[in-house]
């Protein structure tokens, strides 16, 4: 800390603007705990599919590598049967069934 220099006003403002932009992007708040996957009768890799959706929401397109990782076990977001077991297990209380529908539309 001997040569420490505090941020100037321009740098602080850049951080504030960056935070505003990041908060404005409606990302899925999935922490990838995979509790939802454990009870899913279709074994959908829900956190990985939500990564795809977050990429789509951020950049307007999906990443081929993310999609490949999401369907590695052969399951798609559209394979969801709507049983709701995932939502019961989700500590974040995400509307997983609704988000999987959006994911299937935009990422598959």
Image: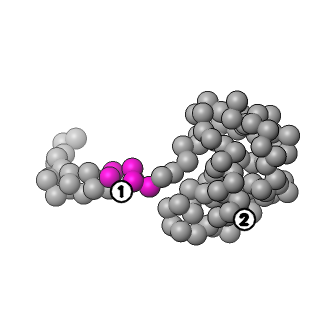
* Residue under pointer 2: 108
| Residue 56 appears in the figure | yes
Q: How is the image coloured?
A: one colour
Residue 97, above or below 101: above
**21 inside magenta stretch:** yes
Magenta part, dominant SS:
helix
- The reply to whether dot 2 and dot 1 touch (C-beta < 8 Å) is no
Q: Residue furthest left?
A: 9
Q: Residue 105: name its quadrant.
A: bottom right
**Magenta-highlighted residues:** 19-25
Q: What is the crowding at mark 2: few (fewer than 14 residues within 10 Å), some, or many (at least 20)?
A: some
Return the x and y of residue 107 as percentages of the image width and height. 67, 64
Label 1 SS: helix
Toward which corner of the image does residue 90 lie, by quadrant? top right
Q: Mark 1, residues whose alpha carbon is within 10 Å: few (<14), some, or many (≥20)?
A: few
Where does the image place residue 53, in percent across and percent down from the top left? Answer: 61, 57
Q: Earlier in the sequence, mark 2 or mark 1?
A: 1
Residue drawn where x is 70% and y is 30% of the image = 88
Q: Residue at x 69, y 35 (%)?
A: 87
Label ID, residue 21: 1
């Amino acid at each position: 800390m001997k040569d420490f220099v505090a941020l100037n006003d321009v740098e602080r403002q850049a951080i504030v603007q960056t935070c505003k932009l990041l908060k404005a992007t409606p990302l899925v708040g999935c922490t990838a705990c995979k509790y939802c996957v454990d009870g899913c009768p279709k074994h959908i890799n829900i956190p990985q599919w939500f990564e795809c959706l977050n990429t789509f929401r951020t950049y307007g397109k999906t990443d081929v590598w993310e999609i490949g990782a999401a369907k590695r076990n052969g399951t798609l977001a559209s394979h969801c049967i709507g049983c709701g077991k995932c939502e019961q297990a989700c500590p974040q209380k995400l509307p997983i069934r609704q988000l999987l529908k959006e994911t299937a539309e935009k990422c598959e």
